[in-house]
């Protein structure tokens, strides 16, 4: 899907709940744009992102999401942690397609070989980033916490670790 993904999400909500009421869909859809529906998984995230930025490391979000991601990052008060946001619905390419990783690098003003992508899915994050020419670390295997990611001269893009409440 591209843009706000409404037709896709309308199908998912309707087939999952058995309810095709337009008002119900809008309530559910809008709920997932708020900080009531999501939280950041790691309380250390902000400290680490701020330390990385202070050290001069450029940071990007690379996400298979729709256009609600930017308002969601604002609602979670973490939009300012990142120098760039590459959203699949805007880039019109989903991970593992290398295009989204290349776009993130372009937005950061770097070459893919200068980037490290940290993600939680071997296929989408690791293989996709590597196909784009980036290095990649698998969350939970190569990296277990934000504390392990120390400021250094490597450029990072992170899977933000959002989960529903």
Image (tube, helix red, strand yellow):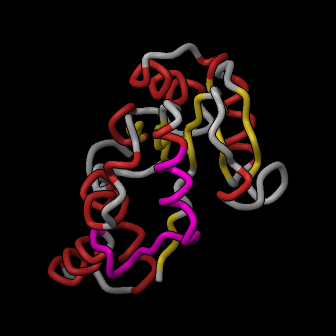
- Residue 7 appears left or right of 39: left
- Residue 89 appears left or right of 25: right
Q: Where residue 75 sits in the image (x, y, percent)?
A: 26, 66
- Residue 99 appears left or right of 127: left
Q: Is residue 150 magenta?
A: no
Q: Where residue 114 sits in the image (x, y, percent)?
A: 63, 19
Q: Where residue 105 sits in the image (x, y, percent)?
A: 50, 23
Residue that appears at 24% across and 57% down: 71
- Residue 130 appears left or right of 89: right
Q: Is residue 39 magenta?
A: yes
Q: Is residue 12 above or below residue 82?
A: below
* Corner quadrant of residue 156: top right
Q: Where residue 153 sits in the image (x, y, percent)?
A: 63, 26
Residue that appears at 41% across and 36% down: 86
Q: Which residues are magenta?
A: 33-51
Residue that appears at 52% across and 21% down: 102
Q: Is residue 8 above or below residue 116?
A: below
Q: Is residue 133 above or below residue 121?
A: above
């Amino acid at each position: 899907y591209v843009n706000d993904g409404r037709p896709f999400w309308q199908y998912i909500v309707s087939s999952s709940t058995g309810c095709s009421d337009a008002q119900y869909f809008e309530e559910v859809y809008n709920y997932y744009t708020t900080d009531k529906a999501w939280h950041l998984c790691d309380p250390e995230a902000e400290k680490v992102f701020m330390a990385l930025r202070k050290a001069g490391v450029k940071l990007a979000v690379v996400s298979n999401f729709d256009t609600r991601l930017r308002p969601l990052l604002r609602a979670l008060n973490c939009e300012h942690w990142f120098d760039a946001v590459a959203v699949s619905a805007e880039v019109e390419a989903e991970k593992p397609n290398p295009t989204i990783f290349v776009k993130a690098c372009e937005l950061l003003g770097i070459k893919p070989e200068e980037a490290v992508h940290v993600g939680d899915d071997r296929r989408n994050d690791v293989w996709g980033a590597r196909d784009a020419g980036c290095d990649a670390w698998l969350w939970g295997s190569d990296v277990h916490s934000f504390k392990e990611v120390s400021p250094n001269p490597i450029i990072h893009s992170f899977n933000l670790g959002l989960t529903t409440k």
